[in-house]
Structure formats: structure tokens, C-alpha cells
Amino acid sequence: MKPQVSVVIPVYQEGDAIVSCLRRIRREVTLPCEILVVHDIPDDSTVPYVEAIGAEDPRVRAVLNTYGRGPANAIRFGVDVAVAPVAVVTMADGSDDPRQIDELARLVDRGVVVAAASRYMPGGQQVGGPRLKRMMSRYAGRSLHWFARVGTRDATNSFKAYSTDFVRQVGIESRSGFEIGLELTAKAARMRLPVAELPTIWLDRQLGESRFDLARWLPSYLRWYRFAYGRQLTAEQIRAGAADRARKYADADVAPTPVAEYVPPQQP
């Protein structure tokens, strides 16, 4: 049966910590799915555990990212190789609630292009994490919701479902951190396409160390925060503007690159 949802999990040296993450996802996701664990290097410590689980459950696959290192490239690659019409991005650290993957995917199936798990809407909660990061994320989400009308109070959360057709229309320009969630939410807002949200409880990771680097990735977040405001655009205008944005930020460490026409990568 063709998957209805592709679950994309970027990983880096998670080791055996991935086992509990995959156990929860396999238990909670009831829709026909594929679970893509995207890693940057062939000898990543996560791979043997994923392959062992995949031998028992064909839904689970370790996928080698060939777009370049980093979470943004891993997510971009995972969405590109996804075969389902809906891609849900979730983290390997246990911070996201896998019970909501089905709910998010069903929102996209009903017609929204981005479905966000929201920590900041009524019923949502964020438990743990750096205080400054929490404050900035909450302010960004609330202000984008009220003034840019982006359709969610948590535009920066990575735990989202996307229409893969929409993603391939507008392209992904992020190449560094976890700002893809904000980028695609901002692009949907500029196209005046529907975005929806449901409340989630986010838990700070209990094992390992977070690789979120606020100082390094803040410029990229600010770029997409500003982009969310403005007149309505078409997908063609967004793609054409990618080249201008690449030139504007050519000297930045996390400069975006022009978005080429979508060509599916070879299935691993």
C-alpha cells in the first residue's frame, strides 16, 4: 500500500537513542506510512539501530542525505525522497508527540498546505528548554499570528506536516538549521494558502545534547520572519525571488541558494 504520510526524522549520531523514538512512532502512527531516518554520513551511529528495526518493519528506512550536512539539508532531502502526499517532520529526541502525526497528516489531507503542532495556542505547552529561546520563539509566533496572519501561533516549531506538492512548488532555500518550518509557513502565508494548527506539548530532550545553535541560526530565522509580511505572491514569484535572496545574502554563512526546478533524487 502506498504510504499516505512520510515521516522525516533528521538525525546525527543519535546511537541507540533512536530506538525509543522509532518505537513510539511505529506504535502511534496508524496511517499507512514510511519512516525516513535521514543521516548525513554513512557511518553515523544511528544507522545500525535503524537498519535492525527496518529488518523487522519495512516502513522504517535509513536514508543517506546527499544534499550536504546539517538538519536543513537532511529535512530537504527527506521531503524530496518522500513518496507520500504528506510529509511530517519530527525530531529524534523525543520532544514531539508522535500521537499527533496522524492528526497533522489528516489536516493536510483536508486541504491545508502546512499543519503546525503549536506550543503556544490554548492547550499547548512547552516544558523545558533554554529560557531565551522559549521567549523569542513565543514572541515570534504570536506576532506572526496576529500581524502577518500566518495561520499558526507557532511558526518556528519544526514539528509540522506539509503538502509535498506545495513544498516542491515553492522550494526550500534553507541550508543550515531548523528554520525550514518558519520558511515554509512564511511562504504559505505570502501565497495566502491555508495553514492550520493543533495544540501540542513539547518536552525538552532527556537524552543527549541539543544541537540547536541560536546565535548561528538567528539571522536565518529573522530573514523568514520578515519575509512573512508583504503582498500576495505566486509560487513562480517566490521561486524567482530565491535568486535575488541568494545574491542579497551571498556573504552570509547561511546564504540560501537559488531554487532549481524540482528533480526527484534517486531512491536509496
Image (cartoon, grey):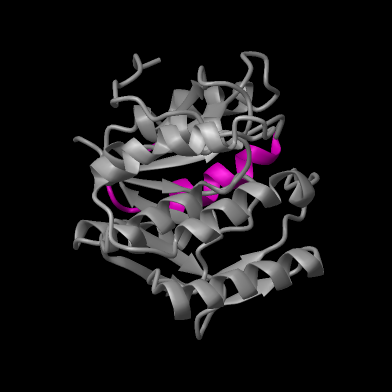
* Residue 232 placement: quadrant: bottom left
Identify the residue at horizontal 58%, vertical 21% (top origin): 68
Q: Position of residue 82 (x, y in %)?
A: 34, 33
Residue in the foreground of this view, choosing between 70 and 20 = 70
Residue 26 in magenta stretch: yes
Quadrant that contains the C terminus:
top left
Q: Position of residue 58 (x, y in %)?
A: 37, 28
**Up-down relation of residue 235 to residue 13 (above or below):** below
**What segment is highlighted magenta in the picture?**
16-34
By secondary structure, the bulk of the magenta-drawn segment is best described as: helix
**Up-down relation of residue 261 to residue 266 (above or below):** below
Q: Is residue 85 visible?
A: no
* Residue 17 placement: quadrant: top right
Residue 255 in magenta stretch: no
Q: Position of residue 227 (x, y in %)?
A: 47, 56
Q: Locate residue 92 relative to residue 153 in the image: left or right.
A: right
Q: Locate residue 67 relative to residue 87 in the image: left or right.
A: right
Quadrant that contains the N terminus:
top left
Q: Locate residue 41 relative to residue 194 in the image: left or right.
A: right
Residue in the foreground of this view, choosing between 257 and 145 = 257
Q: Is residue 247 visible?
A: yes
Identify the residue at horizontal 55%, vertical 71% (top origin): 141
